[in-house]
Image (cartoon, rainbow, N blue to C red):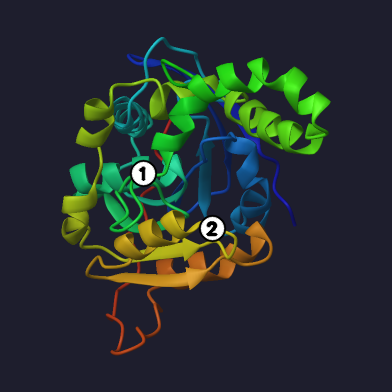
Amino acid sequence: MTLPIRNARIRLPQGQLFWKEVGTGPTIIFLHGAWSDSGEWAPLLDSLGDRFHCIAPDLLGFGESERLSHYSIALETECLADYLDTLRISQVYLVGHSIGAWVAANYALQYAHQVSGLVLIDPEGVEPSNHGYPWRRARGWVGSFPIWTILLWLLRPLAWLLGKRGQWRSHHRTYQQLKRSPAACRLLFQRRWSELQAELLTERIPWLKLPLLVVQSPTASAAQQDMAQRYATAPQAYLQPTPADLSDLADPICTMIFGEAGERPDESGPDESGPDESGDDRGMV
């Protein structure tokens, strides 16, 4: 039976946060990607809500959460910490996609004693070894000096004249996709590169000493695959392809939570005990 999903809001020092919530039991926090909001987790909330306490917030600046003038991974992490503290949730599993995975990993590094396990789907937040950080190119579309956007509109008449409408429209779709999420643009493209680079977790991956499932999309770019593989070097990490449907991640998540992580390609996996179940001692704010 599918349980009803509850919507709620809370005022935190960083801003107002919106979230979806369903179920009871061990708590799983779902953190969405750069071009989405908490709605992307609806299939998993339906699949797992009868076994777990599932929470899917909109990150600050996304969905129905408050818009701000400046964003950072540190700010989103601090907001998540205050949120969990306010709701008196002391132990969680974190599932993150894209920049949500970056926030989740950063949180796990800062509050390792509160995180029982991680699932990172196409994670951001590390610099690929051979490809350079992929968001650098997108700065030309929506950064502080959007040279590609300027050229796109200047060259539109020429593209029409030369019969290149299809190529122009393809580039225009890229621009529209990026502009769809102003918060993601500000966080990834409109900050100083030094500020963004300071938040990368590349050198801190060895400190992610907890059960970690890294899920890699089959359509990911070479740089995205490289980032997933960098996370998979963590001491207790496992790498697997993305299922065809997001709801198919329910079984791998349950497997990790119940301590049946399986085997690495070259060795037996760790025998993890099940999580401590925190009580449902929280308030709806």
Q: Residue 155's spot in the image, x, y percent?
A: 67, 21
Describe residue 113's horizontal placement relative to residue 269 as left or right.
Answer: left
Task: Tell me the amino acid under the disc marked 2.
Answer: Ala
* Residue 71 occupies quadrant: top left
- Tell me the tag on residue 220: 2
Give the residue at the far top of this rendering.
69
Q: Residue 226's spot in the image, x, y percent?
A: 38, 61
> Which residue is at 65% across, 15% downward?
154
Q: Is residue 190 above or below residue 31?
A: above
In this view of the protein, which residue sits in the foreground, 130 or 50?
Answer: 130
Asked if marks 1 and 2 touch (Cβ < 8 Å), the reply is: no
Q: Judge whether residue 63 can be spotted in this image.
A: no
Q: Secondary structure at mark 1?
A: helix
Describe residue 169's horizontal placement relative to residue 177 as left or right.
Answer: right
Give the residue at the far front of this rendering.
162
In this view of the protein, which residue sits in the foreground, 240 or 56?
Answer: 240
In the rendered image, the quadrant that contains the N terminus is: bottom right
Looking at the image, is mark 1 or mark 2 earlier in the sequence? 1
Q: Judge whether residue 38 can be spotted in this image.
A: yes
- Tell me the tag on residue 102: 1
Q: Residue 173's spot in the image, x, y percent?
A: 70, 32
Q: Secondary structure at mark 2?
A: loop
Q: Is residue 235 above or below residue 179?
A: below
Crowding around mark 1 (Cα neighbors within 10 Å: few <14, some 14 to 19, many 20+) is: many
Task: Tell me the amino acid under the disc marked 1.
Answer: Trp
State the CA–CA distance, disc 1 to disc 2.
16 Å
